[in-house]
Structure formats: C-alpha cells, structure tokens
Amino acid sequence: MSQAETRGSALASNNFIRRLFLISVVMIVLGTAVQSFFALRIFESELDPAIEGKALAVGRVVAREVNRAVALDIPFGELRGMQEFLVAARADHPEISYIVVGDADGKPVYGSEAALDMAGRNGREFSVPLRLGEEASYGAVRIGIDERYVRGLLGDVAVDIVTVLLVTLLVTFEVLIILAALGIVLPIRAIESLMRDYEGGRFDRRSGMRGGNELARLGRRLDELGGRVATSYAALRADYDALYESLRNHPSWRAVEEAMRDVAGRFSLTRAEERKPLRIADFSHMRAPLVVFILSEELTRSFLPIFIRDFNDSLFGLSPGVVNSLPISFYMLMTAIATPFAGNIVDRIGARRIFLWGCIPGAVGMLGCAFAQGVLDLMLWRGLAAIGYAMSTIAAQAYLTNVAGTTRRVQAAAIYVGAVMLAAICGIAVGGIVAEQIGFRATFAVSGAVAALSALLAYLLLFDPPPDRNAPPVVRAKWRDYGVLLSRPLFGVLMLGVAVPAKIVLTGFLFYLVPLYLSSVGNSQSDIGRAMTAYFIVVAVGTKLVGQVADKYSDRRGFVLLGGLLSGLGPMLLLGYQGFLPVVLVAFAVGIGHALSTSPLVAMVTEVAARETPQVSTAAVLGIFRVLERVGSVLGPVMAAALATFYGYSVAMAGTGVAVLAGTLLFAVVFLLHRSGKGTPA
Amino acid sequence: MNLHLGLSRRAVLALLGGGAALSAGASRALAQGAAQGKRPPFRIYMALFRGFEDAAQGFQDYLAERGVPVTYIVRNADQNVARIPEMVAEIKAMKPDLVLSWGTGMTLGLVGPYDAPDPKKYVTETPVVFMIVSQPVGAKIVPDLLKPGRNVTGANYLIPEETQLNFARRYIPFKKVAVVYNPAEQNAALTVTELWRLSGTMGFELVDAPLPLDPTGRPIVAEIGDVLDNVAAHKPDMVYLGPDSFLNDLRKEFTEAAVARRLPVFAAGEGPVRTGSALMGVVNRYHTVGQLAALKAEQVLMGRPASDIPIEMPERFSVIVNIRVAKALKLYPPMTLLKFAEIAS
C-alpha cells in the first residue's frame, strides 16, 4: 500500500469520526437541554410551594407571639417592640421581603418603615390571621416574598445546570475520542499494518482481535489467512525435513534447497503458535486514566482550604490561619520531592506499573482525608496523595513520551497539558457542586473512588510499548546539574523572578485565598468552583492562542513581561474592589497572564540554558525547571495565610500580586536593560 | 422560658458534658455495687434553713435520676441561726459522706470563714456542698470560685447584677435606678457597691436609699412608706430589689407599696415576682440550682476533692414578668422580651 493510500484511509476515518462527533454533540446538547429545561421547570414548581410553606411558617411564629401577648390582655394597639421583633423574625429568611402586622381592617399597623412602605405593593404576599381560639380574627400577619431573590435562586440552579451541561460535553468528547481510538482508529491501523506485513511477506504477527464487529471479523480473517500460510509453510518445512536424508544427493535437490532458501528469505514466517499479537501503542490509552486520575485531585480543589479551616486546629504553636495553609503547602512540597524520585523509578520499572502504583497512595490519601480528625493527620493523608500524584503524573508523561517516539514529542506534551486542563476545568466545577450537595468529607471519598477508577482504566488499557531502539535514552537531571544551572544568574532570574512568583500566585491566591475569601463573603461552594474554573478555562484557551502567536516571534520577553504585569497587578486591584465578580475577573487576568508567559518562559529557559550551560541537556533543564518552580507552590499558601492572618484577605491577595510584580521588575531590569535584543548579555 | 448565660455556659457545659459523662460510668458502678451489697448507700446530711423547698427537691431529684444510691438525714434550722452549732456536733458524731448546706448563714455556721478555720467549731473533715449562697467569696466561704481550696464547694445562684440590668433594660430603658435595702445586711451592701460601679459603666443614675435602722440595728418597718415616697420624688425608672433577706420577707408589702407609687420593681429573686408585685426578675430557679449542687455532690462522692471543684452557676436562667403588675402600671413587656419570658400574675 502506498503512502498516499494510507493517508487516504486515515482521512476517511478522520472524516467518519468528525461526523460521529458532530452527531454526538448535537444529540447530547439537545438531550441535555431538554432535560435541563424540565429540571428547571420541576425545580420551579417545587420552589413555589416551598416558599409558601416557609412564609406561612414564619407568619405562624409571629402570629403565635402576638396572640400570646393579646391573650395576656395586652391591648393589640399597645404592643411594644414590634418593629424590632418583626425585623428579628425576618432575619435569616432572604426570600422574605417584609413582614407587617395589620389590624382587622387590613391596615398595616406594625412593621419597619421599609416594610410598611412595601406592604401589598409588589410580588406575592401570604397572610396568617390573628385570632384567639375560635374568636373572630382581629388582624393578620402579612409576609411578602422577595421575587428578585427567588429569581436569583432559579438563576443559580440554571447556572449549575449549564455548568453540568458543559462538563458533560467535555467529558463526552473525551470519551468519544477514546472510544473512537480504541474501537475504530486503532483497529483500522492494526489491520492496515497487518495487511502491509502480509503484502511485504511478513507473516509473523497477528491482529489478535476479539469481538464480533466488522473490524474484528476482518482482523480474525486476516489472522486465519496468516495462520494458514504459517501452517502451510510448517507443512512444507516438515516435508522438506522428511525428504532431506533420502533425497539430498538427488541432482534436483539443490534446486529444492534454493527454492526453500528463497522462501525463507522473501518471507518472515514463524510457526502459527509463535505469531505475536500486533499491538499499537497510542496516546489514547493514557488519556482516559490520566484525565480521571487528575480529576480525582481537582474535585476537592475548590473547598480544600475551607475544609481545613473548619478544623480550626492549632499546631506547633502557630496561628490557625497559618496552620490552615500547611496541608496545601505540604502537598506541594511532597509533590516536588517525590517527582524526581518517581522519574527515576519510572525509567527502571516502566510507566504502566508506576502509574498503577501511584493510584494506590492517591486513592488512599483521598479516602484518609474523608476521615481526617485534625490538621496533622490531614497533612499526612495529603502527603500520601501527593506522592501518588507525583508517581502517576510522571508515569503518564513518560508513557506519552515513549509512545510519541522521537517525532511526536510536541503532540505528547500537548496531550498531557490538555488532559490536565480538562480535568481541572471539569473537576473543580463539578467538585464544587458535588461538595455543596453531599458535603466535603463525602466528596473526598468520591475522589478516592475516582482515583481507584483511574487505576482500573490504566490496568485495562495500558501496556508498555517495546522501547524504541532509535530513540535517544531518556535524560534525567542529576543533582550536579542543579548546581550548574543555579550558578547562572540569568537562569536564576527567570526562576526567581518569573517561575516561582507565578506558582505563588497560583497556589497562594487561586488555590488558597480565593476559596476562603469567597466563602467568607457568603458565596456558595458551586460559585467558588466556577470562579476557580474561570482561571483554567482562560489558561486552556489562552495557551493555545499564545502558542500560535508566540512562535512567530523569536523575542519572547514581551510575553513574559506582559504576563507578569497582568498576573501581578490583577490581585492588587482587590485592595479596592471586593466581592465575587472582581475575584472572577482577577482570576481571568491571572489566567491570561499565565497563558501569555508560561510557554514563552519555558522557551526562554531552554534558550538561556542551551547558551550558558550547553553541557546540561534540554530535558534535564526542563526537569530542574519543573522542580524549582514548585518552591513557589510550597511558599504560596503559607505566605498567603500569614498575610491573611495579620492583614485580612484583601491585603493577602494583593500581597501575592506584589510578589509577582517584584519578580517581574527584576526580570525587566535584568533582561530588558542589561540585554539589547536577543543577543548575549552585555 | 430559659436563657443561656454566656459567662458560665462553657464551664457548665463542660461539667454537664465531660464531667457528667465521666461520672456516669462511676455512678452506675456505684449503683450496681450498692445493689449487690458491696457498698452501703451514701449518707447525705441535708442542713436546711427554710424547710424542704424547691432547691432541696432539685438536689434529691438529680441524684435519684442519676441512680446514685443515697440515704438522706434531713435537718431544718427553721431560720434560726442558733441551731447551727447543734448541727455541727451532730455531723461530727454521725460522720456522713457529705453535707448539703442551704444558704449563706447556714454555710458560714457550718464551715466558718476560710481565713479563720477552727476544726473544733466547724465541719472540716466531711465535704460540704452548698447552694443558695449569693456571694460565696464576699461572705468568705471560699477565697476563689474556680478553686475553692477547702473541703467546700457548691452551686452559685445569684446572676451577676450586670446581666440582670441588661435584661431589665430590654424592658425598661432606664436612666435612673433606685435601690432600697437593709444596710445592716452584708449581702445588700455588696449589691449596692456593685450597682454604684455599674452606674458608671452602664450609664445610669443611682438613687441610694438605705432603710433607717432602729437603735438595735434593725430596719424600721414603719419607715418603708416614707423611704418609697422619697424615692418616688426622684422619679426613678425602676426600683432594684436585691437579695436582701429583710425586704424579701416583706416582699408583698414592699412591692405593693412601690406599685401604689407607680414604681416598677425589678427583683434579683424569684419570690418578689411570683408571690409579690415586682414587675420583673432575672433569676435562677431554685430547683435548677439544687440540681447543679447535686452534680457537684456526685463528683465529691466519686472521690474528687471538693477543694478542686469550681463553684458555678446553672447554664440556664429565667426571666419572669408579672403581667398583673404590667397591666396595673400600663407598662407592657416588649415583644422581644415576652418571647422568652415566664409569665407570673
């Protein structure tokens, strides 16, 4: 089969898959939209009786007290402290806009000024008559409903539904990609590859397909065919061997021998039972387990600091605020420490096994958090989960890199980043909603189960591809390389000025302060999840766009500078503006900043290293970069917590911005003033 | 209806929760031991002063409910301080497991002041648990409520004046308060000192109206009307009636005389509101105080030294309003107070 033909069939399958996707998406969107519509209707229809019930319950409480006073012979017109009493009765009932007490003629007598003003004007009103025993009613308690608040409730539910819809879409895409790969693309590629084998006279592999679909049947037919060839050849060999002794001196034997040698040379033939099943390693195998694994971590992201805060635990004589940040920082620290070790064992033991092993501490750590009694044991469970995270993610990277071979490294990295982003977007948004419904501890348990599911997927899908003999050996950083790199000032400035502050703002501001702050100003867990998701959506989309643009410029300093300014100035705005929307907008700004600077920064780091420390390989440089930037991840929460304890959330959020801005300034001074253009430092 | 008192709430919760849970097992063990004849029931000597009233009942109710095996030796001094030395002698002879003492006079008579203990005159070996003592520290029964330091503990019952006045203010937003009292009583004098301090911190004017004394040092009953007339001339928003034994005995006459002059009376005790014509009181119910004393007694019987058991107040207290007086004065309770007030008439 020619190259063109191969591409043709691949195109055909791509076309087919594209249509499959289109149809699936249309069906899902339609289905979910219809379902959402009805869900909202049901909520609405159940909301009205619930509101009526609550209004009447509040009204009855007020009526009981008024009746009690009147029964004590206090004249209805001379009740004292009614305004204060009615205001207190309305407290904690945001759906009630006013409570007034009216006389027998329906004239409002008691209530706050605002309540008397609103009475009977707008919206629904419920009333509870005032009467003693069976006597005639002498007045009524009237409860007004705040329609704006009720509409807001409906709006919240609608936003939840849309969030679920979007996440469903994303997850469906993911599932479709995997199903299409496993069910269609990979089998077609296997059959193609087998047919090319046969065409070239190689009969030592078989498809090994099972199942009843067309592709599998075709695969099995090809296997039978190959098997028959192998059996025939074996029979031929047997005949040849049997005749060898008696006929080897026959004059024509030489021709027979010639023919046999020719067959053996032209065809690769083994005995039927020795034919190996043909397996095509592919990114798709890793995608599902990886997304699911990271999802388990992200599910708890939006409430972790709130969960820790609720322990209100003190430790080592530190203030509760700082103690609260320790589990998050400890997690980051353990990831940073475990990653290089995990990297080393992956090379020796294999990516599949390390991924599977990583799921064990991952799942156990999550489950442990569900039952944690204090901050100390919570920290230990988080540390365990961190080790799992380090093992599984490094294994996934290694797996993808192995599958990619030398030619598709960029694609492998894109798939890894894509999986992380997808899991973050879905996990944080869904985690917030789930936590609001079933509670923090139960959500941790769900996370543990999800990590276990990831292990199951990995067990079913992954196999370690045979090592590619042409690929260069994987280079991992040696401890000595850290010293070499850190002794170079330019590398240090990139780390200290850009990479570390970026992580400080990510973990300190976004992961730690945003949930705590939003919770403190009364936002629901679902809203907190959505606010944090804003960051990841911007980063996911932005990184792609920036990647396309940035490649056209060889000078990347502008991107890094702009990114630093955005993600530094953003949080500082929160000194002046407070509430949900400003925080979401700042999360957006930080996201844009990170999207702008992340890839250009990596490019600059490798360039600087390539020029200044050519003895350290690019892969090692990147490994060291990833470990060192985690210093910021560890510092972020502790720094944010310390600031928040002494100066409050606004100042702490601004403080993370100051860290970024200071670093950006350092970067600007060193790289813009001391360096003209992209040449060597002056 | 009952209220939570912030001051002692945590401590009492800890006691009722932690302490009681700890002691529950022990009590059960004690009860079982007694049932199997391993240990005879505890003997508690109840030294009462005004007969077997609500606090004594609360004490016995609590121990019965907890299943602590006890037998009681009940003695009543019938308001006669002279009988106390006989009771001391009897206690020394009988050697009960614990003495329950009612009131300030009785308790001081049994255990003496902490700075002049005399093992010959007072009960020292047998642990004493007191109740209905308004000022345990002021009366020199113990030096420190949290750590009595001697073989004596008990249940406090008087709610701090500041708390009382804060509730009074929710009914009557007073600027001027008059206090009428028997200057010969230590209790009353301590209360007035505290009211003077509060007049500064809470911002009100205090009309200090002691009753005149006769040459023997007893207040002159016939002068009460004149004193109230003088007080009324100052136009106070209310009259404060403290834990004053003399006026509490005359509560009906005193409060009715005040109402006749359109003066609302705020009382520190239950009696003047329920059986007199005081408008309002913020009080601990005697039954509840008795129960708390019984909790302390249980801890002592379990083997915890009385000297280590803090003296506390019940977690809940009552706001009582006399609606008959409210109507007579046309001074109706505000709804927010009425919600949790107990109504007397």
Image: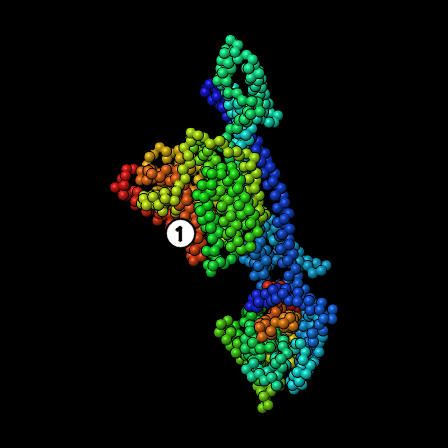
Q: Is residue A480 shown above or below B274?
A: above
Residue B150 rendering spot, x and y as whole percentages: 58, 77
Asked if one can make out residue A441 in the rendered structure from this viewpoint, the answer is yes
Q: Amino acid at mark 1?
A: Gly
Residue B303 rendering spot, x and y as whole percentages: 63, 72
| Colour pattern | rainbow
Outermost residue to the right: B36
Instruction: Indicate left or right for A224 with A553 as reference.
Output: right
Residue B100 rendering spot, x and y as whole percentages: 65, 77
Q: Which residue is mark 1?
A: A655
Assign a secondary structure to mark 1. Answer: helix
The residue that appears at 49% across and 72% down in the rendered structure is: B201
Residue A270 rendering spot, x and y as whole percentages: 54, 22
The residue that appears at 54% across and 77% down in the rendered structure is: B143
Between A177 and A650, which is closer to the camera in this rendering?
A: A177
| Callout 1: chain | A
The residue that appears at 61% across and 53% down in the rendered structure is: A143
Instruction: Indicate left or right for A92 with A596 as reference.
Output: right
